[in-house]
Amino acid sequence: MHSAPAQAQLWQPVADTQSQAVLKPFALTGTDLTHGNSRITLDVVGGRTVGVLAEAALTNTEDLVRAILAAWGSPEKNLAGLVKTFNDPQISDQRPRRVCGNHR
């Protein structure tokens, strides 16, 4: 499986990150969230999420976008639009194998 990691930074309590509606499809085990072959790992310091690492198949844009939205604290209503953007050939053809972003 090829994967496309994504990273972003947060500073919210872990429970707030884990309980976001956009992450509903994922099963929680400690600081890992899994959905099929996709995995989101929360980087936690002092009970706060300070980073998000997402690994998903390059063909699984939705799980990757869910991780990005969770890192941004964005509502689930933005899922369809961002998935559409990521799947646009003008974007997906340019997408690097590694996708990284920061939220401050």
Image (spheres, grey):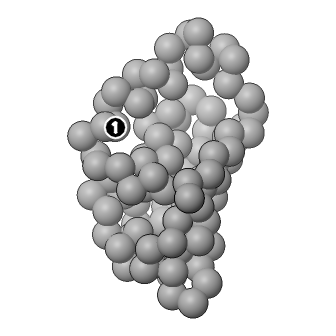
- Residue 46, relative to residue 104: is it above or below? below
Q: Residue at x 52, y 43 (%)?
A: 64
Spot occupied by residue 49 in the image (x, y as percentages of width and height): 53, 74
- Residue 91, relative to residue 29: is it above or below? above
Most extreme residue toward the bottom, as rendered? 46
Q: Residue at x 40, y 22 (%)?
A: 84
Most extreme residue toward the top, as rendered? 90
Front position in the image: 74 or 18: 74
Mark 1 secondary-structure assignment: helix
- Residue 12, relative to residue 74: is it above or below? below
* 10 Å crowding of disc 1: few (<14), some (14-19), many (20+): some
Q: Residue at x 74, y 29 (%)?
A: 96
Is residue 7 something one can see in this rendering? Answer: yes
Most extreme residue toward the front, as rendered? 104
Is residue 39 something one can see in this rendering? Answer: no
8 with respect to 21 (left or right): right
Spot occupied by residue 13 in the image (x, y as percentages of width and height): 43, 79
75 with respect to 66 (left or right): left
Q: Quadrant of residue 12?
A: bottom left
The residue under label 1 is: 79
